[in-house]
Amino acid sequence: MRIYFLSTAIILILFLSGIDQTFSQTRIGVILPLMENSENPEDKVLGEEILKGITDALDEYNSQDTLNNIIIKTEDTRRDPARVLELIDQMGNDTNIKAIIGPVFSSEISSNAGAPAFHKIPLITPTATQNFLAADNQYIIQLNPTYETRGKLMGRYATKELNLNRFLILSEESYGIKYAGAFTSEVLKARGSVLSTQYFKVDDTDLDSAINELKKAMISKEKFIDFGKLSADQIQKFSSMNFVFSNTDSLAGAGDIVSIYKIFGSRADRVVDSAGIKTFSITKPDPNRNYIYGAAEAIYIPVSNPEKINLILPALRNAGLNLPVIGTSDWNNEMILKDNSEYIIRLYFESDYYLKDVSKKDLSGKSETAEKNYYMGYDAMKVVAKQISEGNNTRGKIYDALQKVTDFKAVHINYTIKNRSNHEMMIMKFENGRLEMLGDYVY
């Protein structure tokens, strides 16, 4: 009998211990623009799509980890900064809540950026891109790379990986300026140059003025050789030289006027000086001659709407600016790129969204925008849950762990957190009508 009672007691202890372990919980706040009071169904879509991603990731996690369950408390921000502050204060004062996922918009956070640090509660925004939001405010984690990071990342990629040094910039006046300055600073850091930066208004339908200014600036830096007027001795001399573009016979046969930078690349000035080659400059091209330019190697074009591509690329071609393009995430529209493929020599751009696993695309016929919103929520919960699964179940531990995240393999993007914001993106390339992902890149 004593053995029976002892065995029963042991089983009961193990059972109760198992219950305690199974229901060990971490509570997370979720604040999104659910717009529950809006009469317009469209207002509700964004928040609902992100929340669906969060809850699906949560269900997956809780079904796999019975020792560190997570539960969420969801609130509606109503897209109101005052409401966001109220929710951060409420959740910050609730010691059971260990972190907050949300909100969505930079404008919801910027005026409340000090609140998470006041409560020492990590706030993880899946989508906000405003510069310095996290860098200047402790306890805020930005999973979406900032405008500055995006511009600098492409500046580094263009100079370090593509070995380009001389650029033009054509940018939208309001949105694009956030990228253009960052791109320029990175190019200058690499000892490259930006020959000219021109801005246009988002509603402009004629870009000729801005593009002509770019062309004028480029021409002012050019030094040319007229292959249509070379003597036999000069042709023979050039034939013995190492061209990085075409060859003497082809250029002479076509009678082209060619930039020394196109022929000799970055070493052009040294080559022509040492060889005693005479060059000339122009202020205005002769309409009866064919010019091959080389002072600019590529053009950086930040856009906020892919539809603008339909206007920009033909206008560049008409102006004779046939350059490789360095772009931003909004160039990631395969249909528009294919429609304009005749105008694209090569295009490289950073992307904050690419599904490497094609099986993840099956979201019951949802649009790409809905898909992106879903995975921004899904991946935000995944990266937070990962830290909790490793025993980081207090505010301080979650915050510290998130700051150390490196190359976290999310579905739509990878996360490498530096200075509290994500610095990892995908590099995409479009050439010959084909879009491909070249790889991940960290700034």
Image (cartoon, rainbow, N blue to C red):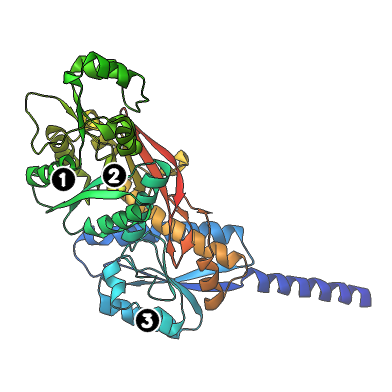
Real-space Cα separation, disc 3 to disc 2, in angstroms: 43 Å
Residue type, mark 1 in image? Ala
User: Within 10 Å of the Cα at label 1, are there few (<14), some (14-19), or many (20+) other Cα atoms?
Assistant: some
Residue that numbered label 2 is attached to: 166
Describe residue 143's horizontal placement relative to residue 299 as left or right: right
Number of the label disc, if any, that sits on residue 115:
3
Labels 2 and 1: the sequence-earlier one: 2
- Residue 116: percent from left, percent from top: 41, 79
- Residue 222: percent from left, percent from top: 20, 38
**Which residue occupies 33% across, 34% down?**
274
In which quadrant is the N terminus drawn?
bottom right
User: Within 10 Å of the Cα at label 3, are there few (<14), some (14-19), or many (20+) other Cα atoms?
Assistant: many
Which type of secondary structure does the marked residue at label 2 adopt? strand
Which type of secondary structure does the marked residue at label 1 adopt? helix
- Residue 137: percent from left, percent from top: 39, 76
Residue that numbered label 1 is attached to: 217
Q: Marks 3 and 1: CB-CB under 8 Å? A: no
